Image (cartoon, rainbow, N blue to C red):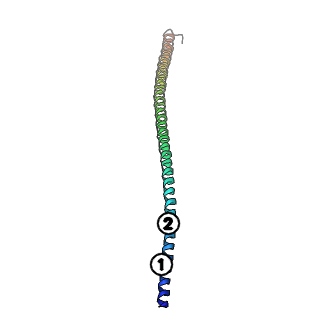
Amino acid sequence: MNAARAVAWEVEVSVDERITKIESDMGHVRSTLTDVKDDVKCLRGEIQEVRGEVQQVKGELQSFKTDVAKEFGSVRKEIADAKTATAQHFGLVRTELEKLRTAIEGTKVWFLVTCSGAVFSGIGAVVGLHALKLF
């Protein structure tokens, strides 16, 4: 009977020890869960901060895109204005070249008329001198 009591006592002791160990482990698990909950709360706060910063960056990026679009619009307008001015200047240059061509053609005609007049006058003078038998 003593042996049965000894076995029962060992079983009872080991059950008590096991329960004590399980209770101790549960305390550690609760402590760990509390730490995890605190960490999750901190992470939520940090995630909210990051979201706020991301929204701020998005706003700044949108503002930058708007500024770039305005600048490109301004540059496009300046290029279009420069093209228009260049076309006008080329038009003026073409007009001046046409005036110069007309002046050159007029000079050619004047030169031909003057030269042919001088030739005809010379021929007339030779014919007249020949008729007068002076030549």
Structural crowding at the residue carrying mark 2, measured as other residues with C-alpha within 10 Å and reported as few (<14), some (14–19) or many (≥20): few
Lower position in the chain sequence, tag 2 or tag 1: 1
Q: Which amino acid does label 2 sit on?
A: Val
- At mark 2, the secondary structure is helix
Residue labelled with disc 2: 29
Tell me the residue at 50%/47% (across/down): 49
Name, please, the residue furthest toward the front: 1
Using the image as rendered, state which of residue 133 and residue 33 is in the foreground: 33
Q: Which residue is drawn at 51% across and 11% down?
A: 129
Vertical order, 92 against 129 (above or below): below
Residue at which label 1 appears = 15
Question: What's the mark number on residue 63?
Answer: none
**129, above or below 18, in the image:** above
Q: Where is residue 120 in the image (x, y as percent from the top left)?
A: 47, 15
Residue 117 x/y as whole percent: 48, 14
Q: Which residue is drawn at 47% across and 85% down?
A: 8
Q: Where is residue 97 in the image (x, y as percent from the top left)?
A: 48, 24
Tell which of 68 and 88 is nearer to you.
68
Quarter of the figure with the C terminus: top right
CA distance for labels 2 and 1: 20 Å
Against 34, is 105 above or below?
above
Q: Mark 1: few, some, or many residues within 10 Å (few <14, many ≥20)?
A: few
List x then y, in percent, for residue 39. 51, 57
User: Mark 2 or mark 1, which is nearer to you?
Assistant: 1
Q: Which residue is drawn at 51% across and 63% down?
A: 31
Disc 1 residue type? Val
